Amino acid sequence: MINRVVLVGRLTKDPELRYTPNTGIAVTTFTLAVNRNYTNQQGERDADFIPVVVWRTAAEHCANYLRKGSLAGVDGRIQTRSYETPDGQKRYVTEVVAENVRFLDPRSKSVGGEDFTSFGEEVNEDVPF
Amino acid sequence: MINRVVLVGRLTKDPELRYTPNTGIAVTTFTLAVNRNYTNQQGERDADFIPVVVWRTAAEHCANYLRKGSLAGVDGRIQTRSYETPDGQKRYVTEVVAENVRFLDPRSKSVGGEDFTSFGEEVNEDVPF
Amino acid sequence: MINRVVLVGRLTKDPELRYTPNTGIAVTTFTLAVNRNYTNQQGERDADFIPVVVWRTAAEHCANYLRKGSLAGVDGRIQTRSYETPDGQKRYVTEVVAENVRFLDPRSKSVGGEDFTSFGEEVNEDVPF
Amino acid sequence: MINRVVLVGRLTKDPELRYTPNTGIAVTTFTLAVNRNYTNQQGERDADFIPVVVWRTAAEHCANYLRKGSLAGVDGRIQTRSYETPDGQKRYVTEVVAENVRFLDPRSKSVGGEDFTSFGEEVNEDVPF
DNA sequence: TTTT
DNA sequence: TTTT
């Protein structure tokens, strides 16, 4: 099964960093505004407002370096989950869990160039083809 | 801005084909179950249940050839929108708008191999690099 | 079949715009340097240098607005082809054909925000789910 | 920087498993034929033939379960490198390094459903939005 | 509840 | 042949 998302857009607000109550794991959430590449009937450019979740070390990097309006690239997957509202209704949520976040603003270049999430080490020995 | 999604998963139910009331455009919706590649604390394999929307010709192809349990590949983008519930509450929806759908079941090979959505013609003249 | 690529990186040189001799179609080529998110044994950050091809209107936009060092986002697919060298050897080439190119530099914001490649119009009537 | 590829296609030959001479790390290579969704001037359906590299545990899974003709999904990134030919010429190679490979054939369902590459554990506690 |  |  494959589930892969890539987004480039701007934060609609400052990111929110929290910690899970039991295990104290960092989790940051923000919404990315991704402009569509066409305009609607009113001649306005529409955008999609996509909820993004980041865990652990990357969560803290995002909280430190991203702000409202920051340009960010997100590489991750779609996650769905359901929860109960206080009055007992079931609600369904679709959001993006980021595996990598890139800081694409010029000022954040120093850090955007840094690795703060990686999928593992690489083998540099013996190229295959 | 970039907004790109690729999914491979199975339909949770038969797809639903409808037509827009004013302009009669075909639109098919279904939910893709995409198994995650890890198991949860209860040792079960979790899945994400991702709502997918397909428009026009591809909508009709999907309605004809996909069924509950069909394996499908979706290439598209995330769309968010809001609507009002009958009792006046605002709700936010995140779904995938498919630009290409691939039928990956062996029986549907004949049609899965067909083009039913393409991004435009190609130039075969004069290779560039 | 699915074949989807998303890249964000910097041009290694100015883009090259040419026209196909027979039909006069615009085609721009450039190489994107995409930094890897880890460092090699020598402690240097490696990069991949990925050849990109853009056709038609988007080709001319790229030639106008991108320069050596520009930050660009590319959404497209991998293409392979072979050709004969002057001395009769067969060579195989793998490159990315861009369907969308985003200009991510702050100065090019005005044009990077513009649509210069779009997959088709949208239906705004009748939301589906 | 972002570098993301998703492919679904069929193996052109049996995969080849080797081990790096110094560290004995498993590496499997194969070529994926990915049919394009349009036909060329001769009315044939073209395909791209994309070289894929898989490392470590996933390499051995691929060697065990994939064969010529197998349908596979690949999630990874583009890598470029250069090497010297025996007669001293420099050659440039562009290939896909797989981070996840999915076995999409019905018979391989039992294993295709299994996890053989994962980006790390998940936190199930405390949903974020 | 939305960004440039 | 490589970018910040």
Image (cartoon, coloured by chain):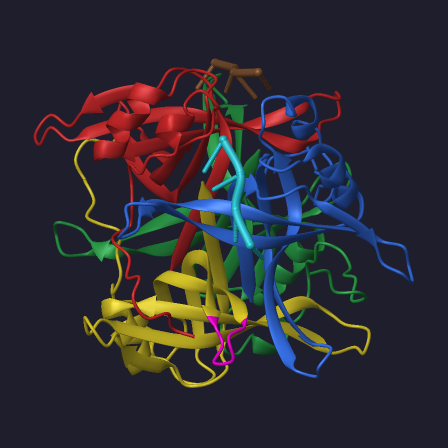
Chain colours: A blue, B yellow, C red, D green, E cyan, F brown
- Residue D102 quadrant: bottom right
Residue for point 75% across, 22% down: C43
| Image location (x, y in percent) of residue D10 | 42, 61
Residue for point 53% across, 68% down: B90
Residue for point 42% across, 25% down: C31
Quadrant where the image shows the C terminus of chain C: bottom left
- Of helix, strand and loop, which mostly describes the magenta segment? loop
Look at the image and give the residue range highlighted in magenta: B84-89
> How many marks do you count on the picture?
0
In-front residue for pair C57/B122: C57
Residue B87 highlighted magenta (yes or no): yes
Residue A66 highlighted magenta (yes or no): no
| Image location (x, y in percent) of residue A37 | 35, 44
Where B52 sits versus D45, above or below? Answer: below
Could you tell whether D129 is left or right of C110 in the image?
right
Could you tell whether C56 is left or right of D119 in the image?
left
| Image location (x, y in percent) of residue B44 | 74, 78
Where C57 sits versus A80, above or below? Answer: above
In-front residue for pair B23/B33: B23
Q: Can residue A129 be spotted in the picture? A: no
